[in-house]
Image (cartoon, grey):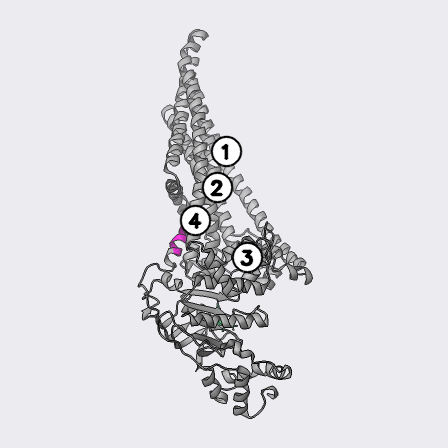
Amino acid sequence: MPYPFKGVRLPRGGPAPAETTTESEELLFGGPLLYDYGFSRHELAAAGLSFPAMARRIPTMLVLAATLAWRADRRALLAVSVAELGMGLARAFGLVATNRVLLQLFAGGPTPERIRAALPALLLVGLLGGSSVLLSAVSTAATGRLEPKIEGAATVEFLSRAIRVELSAIQDEEFHRLLDSAQFGAAEARRTVGEAVAVANAVIGMVAAGGVLTVLAPVLLPLLVLIAVPRAWGAVRTARSRYASVQAWLGHMRASRLITSLLTDQRAAAEVRVHGVGAWLLRHFTQMSRANEAEQTRLARRRAGTDLASAALSGLAALATYGVLYVLLTDGQLPLAVAGTAVLGIRSGVASITAMVSQLNGLYESALYVGDLHQLCRVGDRLAIPSGGAALPERVGALELKDLTFSYPGRAEPAVDRVSLTIEPGTVIALVGANGSGKTTLAKLICGLLRADSGSLTWDGVEIGAADRDAWFGRIGLLAQDFQRWPFTARANVVVGRPEARVDEDGIRRAADFADAGSVVTGLSNGWSTILASGYRNSEEISGGQWQKVGAARVAYRDPVLLIADEPTSALDARAEVDAFRRIRGLAAQGTTVVLITHRLAASASADVIFVLNQGRLVEQGSHEELMAAGAASGPDGYAALYRLQAAQYVAEARIVGSANPSALYAKSEHCPSKSGIPCARNPERNYVHDHDSQAQSDSGSEPGEA
Ligand SMILES: Nc1ncnc2c1ncn2[C@@H]1O[C@H](COP(=O)(O)OP(=O)(O)OP(=O)(O)O)[C@@H](O)[C@H]1O
């Protein structure tokens, strides 16, 4: 496995990345989590991290921090800049004034006179010291104002990209890594300003000390630079290896976060306890933590080594500086008073260097993450769902799919393979087929979440690629079995169906009545204001079936033109399920087009058109009657055979209890004024038990129960 960045290696003699793979990683995640930096071939490739490249980036980083701050609060940035510059100047003039004081004190004449002569310069030193303190306070206050604003703005930048990218990007591993890394960037952006200010301050201090030394003893200046260089090298080296390590271990961090959240997750709580998954996962967590601890130890050792080397080199340079000073003094080339100021200048310069190094370290690391945030913004903008485009006509027409094909990345076989079909407005169409046959993928293509590789998808004649996708989304409602259960109030869980619209209390109640969610809310201790989660004040858990009713109310509140219902009744009891399907048909009667995905063929039987998928291909289509009439011709996996198989489970039972006609509840609505004004297909009312009986008998001459 190639290791990430040029020049950044795992410790000599230490474990190679592949060898750090733990048993837990293998078992839980199917292989090493340590990142394979194959992403140099990927568009998300990290910028070069060689030493010169990084040194060149330092000014860019300062500009980056300044840009963030400028956008967040210009006045505060100006206040910080002026205060820091003032402090640097005060330090430079302070040194000059100190030099004056020393010159006066070491001059000839009686001591009181020398002191009196030094007094004005002494006062200036005090004045400059006092203003430094004041300016420092101004800088602290302004930085404090800036930092939260920057963090807030950076977080919004991050989140706004995350919510706008195409679904395929969200499912892409590389993009997810960038998301994870950039997430640190949003938090680090806040620190960048303080660190940049401190670095700038230290640089000003160094320039001030350097300026004074240039005037007093120019030969000392290159030596001051020599003191600085090893420190800067050490800082960059440490930051670089920390950053590279974090990048390589992002997968581990994500896995650890995942395990932590699973161990405290309410939905996992039962298995965590009853199946003993808790202790098992904790053991794996501990094993993976150990690997991470080893990496931290490696980093600490590496840092200690780097610090030692850079301090030793810097110390040698300092020693050489004082040696030169000694020679200058003993040769009489430098008066004692000037030498005293030079010592102060060197000390001040070294202090500035030390401060700069420690801040640069932090700044460097922060700026790398902020760089990731910028990269995320760039990539996110490129992968964003386009805004604008052709408007969809007011009149709602048919959805037409022609040779629509889609493959998931890395999959050899297409999930949807050259599917052509038409969905007339105001009809209920059912997508049926075996597990993995492509129903959900096709539904995602229809609602614009996934983009087809080839073929065309038009609505009212407008091709999805050219259409305004927000307008497309605006026409669609989603009711999936795994719909989002927002841990907010019951009211919020309904109004989230139309999040931007003004809250309409009557609309909420109508939607709740329609979906039979009113009775669920009535039973809650705080009614509509109850938080539908546990662990909060005024919160209550509700059952899976009750959630499905709330989800249905959300969709009813949304009042979509096209409803995609993917196993919408999986958690409902028998009566509630029948009612729900009747309501879904009711929606069609009001003009909503319904795409129903279900394995309950009794429910799909009442659809106007049934499309049967097999391995991504559309293999059958027609009304229930037409498909049943096809009978044996459609084969053992065909609709008719599967329908009989399911129906057979109930028929014998229905006969025993002398059941009244249950499928009448699924029957199609008589009235169908579609939103578009186009009349929807209408079939005779049907009793599926009868249908089944008669069909089965006519097809095979045997009783279905005997099949
Ligand atoms: N995000 C994904 N990445 C890769 N492959 C996927 C992804 N989602 C689905 N698939 C694959 O695409 C194929 C079609 O899946 P899809 O979910 O559309 O089937 P389905 O008919 O809805 O199945 P089910 O009845 O089980 O819900 C399957 O082979 C599935 O493994």
Upstream in sequence: badge 3 or badge 2? 3
Asked if labels 4 and 1 touch by Cβ distance under 8 angstroms, the answer is no
Identified by mark 2, the residue type is: Gly
Upstream in sequence: badge 3 or badge 1? 3
Picture coordinates of residue 495, whole percent (x, y): 47, 57
Upstream in sequence: badge 1 or badge 2? 1
Q: Nearer the viewer, mark 3 or mark 2?
A: 2
Tell me: residue 334, above or below residue 51. Answer: above
**Location of the C terminus (image quadrant):** bottom right
Structural distance between the alpha carbons of marks 1 and 4: 45 Å
Tell me: residue 620, above or below residue 70. Answer: below
Q: Nearer the viewer, mark 1 or mark 2?
A: 2
Structural distance between the alpha carbons of marks 3 and 2: 26 Å
Asked if labels 2 and 3 touch by Cβ distance under 8 angstroms, the answer is no
Asked if labels 2 and 1 touch by Cβ distance under 8 angstroms, the answer is no
Picture coordinates of residue 524, whole percent (x, y): 59, 56
Residue that carries the numbered disc 4 in the rendered image? 156
Residue that carries the numbered disc 2 in the rendered image? 362
